[in-house]
């Protein structure tokens, strides 16, 4: 290189490239590239790419990733250099001792806070309900994440409702993350590479929900060898095939799951025989191709569906479909870009009526098309700038429905709604000194309602009374009916107190323009997503968090963190009593608007290496809402408010073939509304709360222990040669001591018929969704 | 479409798969104490004969005895033309108006005002008597059984909502002279459908309403009895209600019809049902209850033999 001698000392060059798993070519997200002599480093982005610009010179670079053997490389940097690195999984190292890099301390050193990453290895170890490893159920073992109970879909993060989580599967929004109500999630563990939950400090690149971001990335597929994974479990059978394409310049994975509830139920349930169905399935696929060193494309998709049909005319189904096309382009060693085109759709249908003269059918859907260019500019070792845009076009179909009554067919469809949500963002992750780093960003979001459509105006809220439309305005096709815009600042900072401890703080503002309309204890498949309008303002959430992170012990085997958060939300939705949320043109008249606040402390202690690994998470928190017309207009605890939440997960290798995992959960009682009194009207016993309270009582505490044992198949054949496939069994027990954990306590009159003039008996009943011990077994294989 | 109703429909299927694991126990939780409040049960209609208004007090939730009546109140109903109907106490808490000769209570289209003076407090409400619609016929049909269900004989009533949106009804069923009045048996209709948004106007009542007149009682062995057997009689009554009363009845259904099990996942929080009765002194004592003046129609039929079964 013809660099003039004069400036040779100041000349800067860039080292960049990809970090991959040596076994299968999968990009390693978040691996660390560290220059010891400068105490500086970077991590790979979600595509495994890194870029580091340094003064020319000689360096030792350490490349490390949890669960993989670290590598050191000597680098003579005198020109822009591309280094692609492949790391060996620790499993391949057999008896060798793994030297953990002293900087392999994700929690302490990383700038980000309020995040939890779960890799598939961990998810597969966590004892699962009916033995089905589950991405979302595993999240429930983390601090700050909770659920209203078994069978409930989704999850709650730091006091956010289920509809306030942004769930992305390869960047595509997943509107309903559940199979079979909420017992299982839609993600096939065979196809998932990485799961990261942001509970706060969400980068400016993301927006649209105010509580959290769950970023699920699919595997790319093995680009070296064909591989088949599969399993036979209590609920699902799974199979996944992956392998190289274009002689290793690309790869693919296709993974499917299907439940066999119907196969099992068929002998018992004869109502299913005539066109009936009772099953759920999902199919996940992805392919990628390296066009050249600077261009790579990915195509991925998901299709899943739950079907419950008595017969061919009666039943319901729901499902998500997503598709993502991505183009990674390295413009220069320092400018990495990705362009994503995304499609996502959630729909459900419901139909009943045995004949043509009397029936009912209803379809509903939400879909979006998104274009998302994003850029990372690795300015120098101290600044990583990200910027980009997002353009979403939504169409909502609340009801495409008709009913027929004795041969009279009536269309009860509601008009579709159209919206545009766009955003521009900018962020910089900046190292101010060797101890202090900041990340600041700004997102500008803009939301537009588009015609054709009708906007209603309603009278003012009178507590407890449905509002009626008093005016309407009709918009022609393409005309703008309402607009909202928000500036969403994001800020986080880290100060290293020592090699082993750091202090972090963050502030995040998020805006949410889509609202999940749900007034039931658990969210359910028929819940309607509805856009902001003249009557529904965007939800806004502000979160402040402060955290302390520390590693300790031999080899820094233990990681401890404590985080405190305060979250304030505006324009929260609640519902009048008796609200009619489905197929209701005047739905907005049944909504109430309020505000929320949530605060808490999360403690997390993890042991990451050794024969025994695991963690303890403890959260103490409060989540409250204040809504005009509910609870005398005073603050009340949200249904998912849990004062104390303790989770313990432990994994222990008994010997080379047997390992044991255990989970323990303790959750203090969630709130519920109990009556004080009763009265009788027209022969019906009506419960009454004299103080007009909401959530005035706490249910008994919830606690549960799950255990599972894993038996690895033999690695050698009888003749001593290695087997060419591997397999393992999982034997699980859920709710080991068969506790009848309360899901709810409800009040009702007795089920007996009461003669006129006789007193009516009232009673309280406690329901446990899982009130017994649930054993399971599954067999999993790979070849 | 009433969300509540839909969920319950769906959950029937889902419950199949997980019913093995769930369980339910009757418990006795401690409840907060509360002062009793005045309850006014004032549902009047234009049937021949006397009309009753009941005044009671609310009770602690688990007090399984008849509610205490409230005596000594002044109770009148006045129509918009100024006609006054005086209700006099016949038993403690029961206030009755008796007709002279063929006189009936009320007239379709008129608005009525309820006046109750209890102690120093005055409570008022208004209600308009809407039109009802005739029950044209009642039929019986066979619902073939299966592995879990025996053959069942079910009844269906046939009636058409008149042209013009905004009619609301409370449909009551009497089996062998006894009213079916479990919380799960509250049947309401808005025009010919379940809810205002349904837009089923001027057509026969939709099938789930026509067939809602069947009681499903469990037999000793846990199976469901046939709703009707030969020899039973059924009487269907359609009472017009105001939109406020319709909303009230739906709220009552949501709050009281708690089948338990998986439907609890989709239960809404316990909340007080509305009232259309107010204390003229807004700072005075609380009151609950409802005032509705409705027109009645009805038809009965006896299930005499299996030859009467209609083809479904």
Image: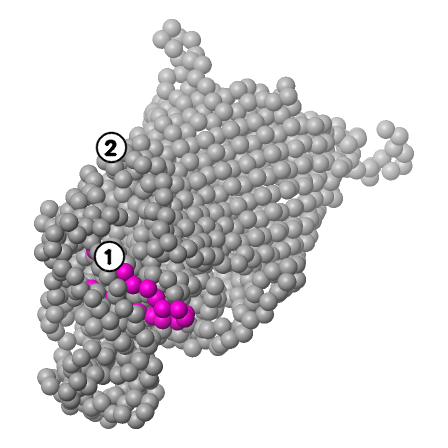
Q: Residue at x 57, y 39 (%)?
A: A323
Dot label at residue A240: none
Q: Residue at x 40, y 41 (%)?
A: A306
Q: Helix or strand or loop: what does disc 2 sit on?
A: loop
Q: In the rendered image, which quarter is residue A266 located in?
A: top left
Instruction: Say which quadrant the N terminus of chain A sits in.
Output: top right
- Left or right: residue B261 versus residue B101 is right
Kindly report the distance in space between the C-alpha atoms of the residues bearing marks 1 and 2: 32 Å
Q: How many numbered marks, from 0 up?
A: 2
Dot label at residue A267: 2
Front position in the image: A361 or A480: A361
Front position in the image: B3 or A16: B3
Q: Which region shows up in magenta? A: B155-173
- The residue wearing badge 1 is B156
Q: Give me the chain letter of mark 2.
A: A
Q: Position of residue A754 (x, y in %)?
A: 12, 65
């Amino acid at each position: 290189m013809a660099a003039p001698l004069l400036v040779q000392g100041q000349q800067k060059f860039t080292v960049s490239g990809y970090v991959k798993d040596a076994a299968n070519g999968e990009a390693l997200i978040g691996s660390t590239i560290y220059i010891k002599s400068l105490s500086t480093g970077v991590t790979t982005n979600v595509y495994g790419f890194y870029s580091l610009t340094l003064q020319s010179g000689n360096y030792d670079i350490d490349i490390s990733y949890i669960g993989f053997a670290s590598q050191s490389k000597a680098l003579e940097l005198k020109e822009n250099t591309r280094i692609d690195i492949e790391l060996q999984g620790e499993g391949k190292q057999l008896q060798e001792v793994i030297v953990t890099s002293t900087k392999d301390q994700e929690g302490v050193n990383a700038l980000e806070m309020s995040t939890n990453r779960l890799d598939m290895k961990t998810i597969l170890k966590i004892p699962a309900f009916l033995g089905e490893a589950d991405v979302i159920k595993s999240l429930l073992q983390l601090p700050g994440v909770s659920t209203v109970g078994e069978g409930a879909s989704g999850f709650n993060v730091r006091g956010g409702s289920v509809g306030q989580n942004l769930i992305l599967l390869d960047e595509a929004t997943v509107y309903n993350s559940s199979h079979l109500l909420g017992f299982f999630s839609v993600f096939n563990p065979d196809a998932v590479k990485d799961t990261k939950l942001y509970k706060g400090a969400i980068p400016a690149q993301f927006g649209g929900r105010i509580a959290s971001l769950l970023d699920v990335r699919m595997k790319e597929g093995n680009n070296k060898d064909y591989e088949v994974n599969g399993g036979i479990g209590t609920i699902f059978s799974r199979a996944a095939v992956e392998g190289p394409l274009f002689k290793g310049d690309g790869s693919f994975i296709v993974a499917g799951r299907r439940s066999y509830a119907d196969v099992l139920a068929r002998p018992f349930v004869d109502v299913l025989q005539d066109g009936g169905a009772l099953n759920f399935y999902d199919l996940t696929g992805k392919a990628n191709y390296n066009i050249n060193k600077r261009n790579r494309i990915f195509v991925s998709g998901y299709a899943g569906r739950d079907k419950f049909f008595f017969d061919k005319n009666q039943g319901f189904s729901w499902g998500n479909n997503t598709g993502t096309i991505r183009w990674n382009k390295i413009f220069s060693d320092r400018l990495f870009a990705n362009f994503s085109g995304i499609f996502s759709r959630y729909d459900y249908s419901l139909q009943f009526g045995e004949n043509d003269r009397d029936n009912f059918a209803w379809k509903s859907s939400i879909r979006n098309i998104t274009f998302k260019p994003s850029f990372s500019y690795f300015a120098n070792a101290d600044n990583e700038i990200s910027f980009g845009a997002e353009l979403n076009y939504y169409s909502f179909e609340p009801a495409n429905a008709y009913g027929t009554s004795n041969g009279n067919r009536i269309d009860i469809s509601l008009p579709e709604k159209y919206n545009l949500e766009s955003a521009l963002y900018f962020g910089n992750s900046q190292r101010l000194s060797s101890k202090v780093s900041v990340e600041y960003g700004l997102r500008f979001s803009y939301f537009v309602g588009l015609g054709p459509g009708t906007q209603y105006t309603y009278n003012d809220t009178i507590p407890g009374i449905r509002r009626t439309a008093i005016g309407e305005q009709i918009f022609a096709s393409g005309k703008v009916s309402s607009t909202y815009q928000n500036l969403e600042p994001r800020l986080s900072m880290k100060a290293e107190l020592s090699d082993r401890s750091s202090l972090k703080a963050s502030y995040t503002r998020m805006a949410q323009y889509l609202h999940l309309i749900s007034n039931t204890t658990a969210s359910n498949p028929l819940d309607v997503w509805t856009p902001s309008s003249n009557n529904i303002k965007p939800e806004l959430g502000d979160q402040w968090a402060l955290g302390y992170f520390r590693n300790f012990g031999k080899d820094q085997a233990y990681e401890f963190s404590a985080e405190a958060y305060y979250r304030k939300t505006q324009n929260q939705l609640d519902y009048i009593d008796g609200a009619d949320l489905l197929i209701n043109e005047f739905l907005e008249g049944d909504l109430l608007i309020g505000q929320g606040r949530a605060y808490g402390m999360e403690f997390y202690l993890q042991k990451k290496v050794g024969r025994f690994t695991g963690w303890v998470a403890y959260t103490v928190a409060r989540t409250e809402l204040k809504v005009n017309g509910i609870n005398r207009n005073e603050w009340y605890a949200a249904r998912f408010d849990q004062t104390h939440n303790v989770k313990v997960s432990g994994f222990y290798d008994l010997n080379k073939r047997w390992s044991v995992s255990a989970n323990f959960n303790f959750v203090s009682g969630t709130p519920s509304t109990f009556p004080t009194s009763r009265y009788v009207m027209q022969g019906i016993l009506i419960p009454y709360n004299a103080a007009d309270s909401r959530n005035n009582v706490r249910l008994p505490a919830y606690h549960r222990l799950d255990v599972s044992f894993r038996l690895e198949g033999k690695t050698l054949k009888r003749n001593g040669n290695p087997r060419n496939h591997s397999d393992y069994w999982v034997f699980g027990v859920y709710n080991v001591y068969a506790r009848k954990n309360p899901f709810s306590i409800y009040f009702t009159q007795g089920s007996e018929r009461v003669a006129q003039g006789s007193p009516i008996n009232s009673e309280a009943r406690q329901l446990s969704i899982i009130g017994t011990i649930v054993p399971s077994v599954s067999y999993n294989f790979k070849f | 479409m009433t969300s509540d109703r839909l969920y319950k429909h769906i959950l029937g299927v889902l419950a199949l798969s997980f019913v093995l694991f769930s369980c339910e126990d009757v418990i006795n939780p401690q409840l907060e104490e509360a002062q009793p409040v005045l309850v006014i049960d004032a549902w009047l209609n234009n049937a021949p004969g006397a009309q009753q208004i009941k005044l009671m007090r609310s009770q602690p939730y688990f007090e399984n005895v008849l509610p205490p009546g409230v005596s000594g109140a002044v109770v009148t109903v006045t129509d918009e033309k100024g006609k006054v109907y005086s209700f006099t106490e016949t038993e403690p808490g029961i206030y009755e108006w008796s007709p002279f000769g063929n006189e009936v209570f009320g007239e379709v289209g008129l608005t009525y005002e309820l006046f109750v003076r209890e102690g120093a407090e005055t409570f008022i409400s208004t209600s308009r008597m809407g039109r009802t619609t005739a029950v044209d016929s009642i039929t019986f049909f066979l619902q073939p059984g299966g592995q879990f269900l025996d053959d069942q004989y079910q009844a269906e009533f046939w009636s058409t909502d008149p042209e013009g949106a905004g009619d609301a009804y409370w449909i009551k069923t009497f089996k062998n002279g006894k009213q079916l009045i479990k919380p799960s048996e509250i049947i309401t209709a808005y025009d010919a459908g379940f809810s205002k948004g349904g837009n089923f106007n001027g057509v026969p009542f939709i099938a789930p309403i026509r067939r809602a007149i069947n009681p499903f009682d469990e037999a000793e062995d846990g199976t469901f009895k046939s709703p009707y057997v030969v020899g039973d009689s059924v009487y269907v009554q359609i009472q017009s209600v105001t939109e406020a009363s319709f909303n009230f009845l739906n709220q009552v259904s949501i709050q009281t019809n708690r089948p338990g099990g998986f439907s609890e996942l989709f239960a809404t929080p316990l909340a007080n049902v509305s009232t259309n009765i107010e204390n003229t002194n807004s700072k005075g004592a609380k009151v609950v209850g409802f005032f509705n003046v409705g027109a009645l129609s009805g038809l009965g039929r006896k299930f005499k033999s299996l030859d009467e079964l209609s083809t479904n």
